[in-house]
Image (cartoon, rainbow, N blue to C red):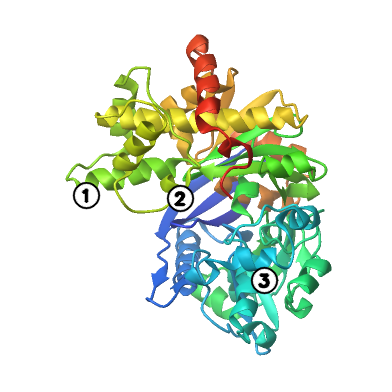
Amino acid sequence: MGRRVTAVDIGASSGKMAFGEYDGRRLITREYRDFANRPADIGTALYWDVFSLYHAVIDGMAYFNSQYGEADTIAIDTWGASYGLLDKEDRLLEPVYHYRDERTRHVIRDMDKVMDTYELFQLTGCQCNRTYTLPQLYSYRTAGSPVLDNAESMLLLPDLLGYFLSGVKTTEMTIAGTSCLMENRQEDWSLEVAERFSIPKKIYTEIVEPGTFKGRLRNPIQAQTGMRNTKLAAIVAHDSAQAVAAIPDFGEGKLYISIGTNVSMGIERSDCLLTEAAYRKGFKNTGGIDRSKIVYRDFSACWHLNEFIRTKKTQGVSYTHPQLIQLAKEAKQDIPWFDVEAPEFNDAGGDFCEKMNQYFERTGQRKLHSDGEFARSIFESIALKVCHYARALKELGISYQEVYVINGAVRNELLMQLISNALGCEIRAGMPYATLAGNLLTQLYALGEVKTVKEMRSLSKDSFEMNRYEPEDRCYWIAAIEKYAELSGGCMEKGYL
């Protein structure tokens, strides 16, 4: 019997679990299980429903145990920056705030009075916006709240859920990198940042590396799930970095593009990139597997398609993603584009089609009328923005020879072809559940079934299929890239942080 591993991956809109078995040659994913992540808006505050997530994880553990037997390990990854504060009795001091809660609306302005954004980038490697942990913590100070002074420890979300399961309070290294509280090597807490922003150092817990173990499950959890010998593993708890860890044969000299609601794209290297040029172009740094560093850029992607679908639904028209992809295929060239980072497209609500046409009119492009053209404009605009930041990396002196596209949007063959067209090179696309795959693989790394990250990624190659796309229509896309750069103007340099 091979090793059995259970993965938990929680995103901002839903959670997923997977049960995997390793037979000595391949990782076989037996089943996926989904659950909702519904934030709680109580009028005066916006919270994550962390206890609903906790119960969903326990229910999933019990289900997998009943179907496939006890897992050797379980591990949790989530989005970054969200946290819980514990008191001296290890109880939550308050509900877990959503990173878009209104208390941080103007906190960046207050932070600029303490430290300018470039100095903060130099100290932490982060391009900080209000969704990071540091602004959320600093908002207590600007509001005169005593919460931080009453806190004994802080745990970021995957570690908080792990604490609920195991009673162990540690912080995994890569999820800490999403806080803007670490020093620029992304390996330890920044005491200077803590001091400058009046964050009590006592709340920081021990940092542990991915590929290690936190401990066994608490007795009540063992009883509820039947997992009496299962260990809680520390994997790459930052979901984006966990997906990168799973890419077959990935490493330096290769570009990753992870596409879902947002795009995260960048490269893996041995050290962070802290140059002023990288800062100006909006690139960020975070930690990866085996103390590697990831230099990346992120921006909205399929969020725009979802907003279009929402708009059409209010008008009595319901589309599935496959239907819109087919309509977009039928729409011909000479489609206007928009900057997917423009502020008007990143606020929820309103008529998304109207927003697009107002943008087109303002930028001297033709308005759209058919739904297929709207969908194609969204897809081509995403591909052109990907191309922009791929070129920006080369302008920073970073070369790459291979391109890998992963996560949910790889199911969209049209978008994959458009990205290959825009980049002018072959891309390899696959692993729609790359983050879950990375979670399972890293647990095998922790168990010693694969000895190195290179072996882990070789196992990924043997376990998951990647499709290849070759560029087409080069004359059209060369002209499109130049027009898009001119269209977007100055906002293309640093983006909207």
Residue at figure coordinates x 53%, y 74% from the top left: 96
**In the image shown, does 193 or 61 lie closer to the viewer?**
193
| In this picture, residue 183 sits left or right of residue 146 | right
Identity, as a three-letter code, of the amino acid under mark 2: Tyr
Identity, as a three-letter code, of the amino acid under mark 1: Thr
Q: Nearer the viewer, mark 1 or mark 2?
A: 1
Say what secondary structure mark 3 lies in: strand
**Residue hosting label 2:** 32
Task: Point out which mark residue 216 bears.
Answer: 3
Spatial distance from mark 3 to mark 2, Cα to Cα?
24 Å
**Up-down: is 283 above or below 168?**
above
Say what secondary structure mark 2 lies in: strand
Q: Is residue 433 visible?
A: no
Say what secondary structure mark 1 lies in: helix
**In the image shown, does 402 or 332 lie closer to the viewer?**
332
- Name the N-terminal-most of marks 1 and 3: 3
Residue 309 quadrant: top left
Residue at figure coordinates x 66%, y 44% from the top left: 282
- Quick check: marks 3 and 2 in contact, CB under 8 Å? no
Q: Residues within 10 Å of mark 2 (few under 14, many from 20)?
A: some
**Residue hosting label 1:** 314
- Name the N-terminal-most of marks 1 and 2: 2
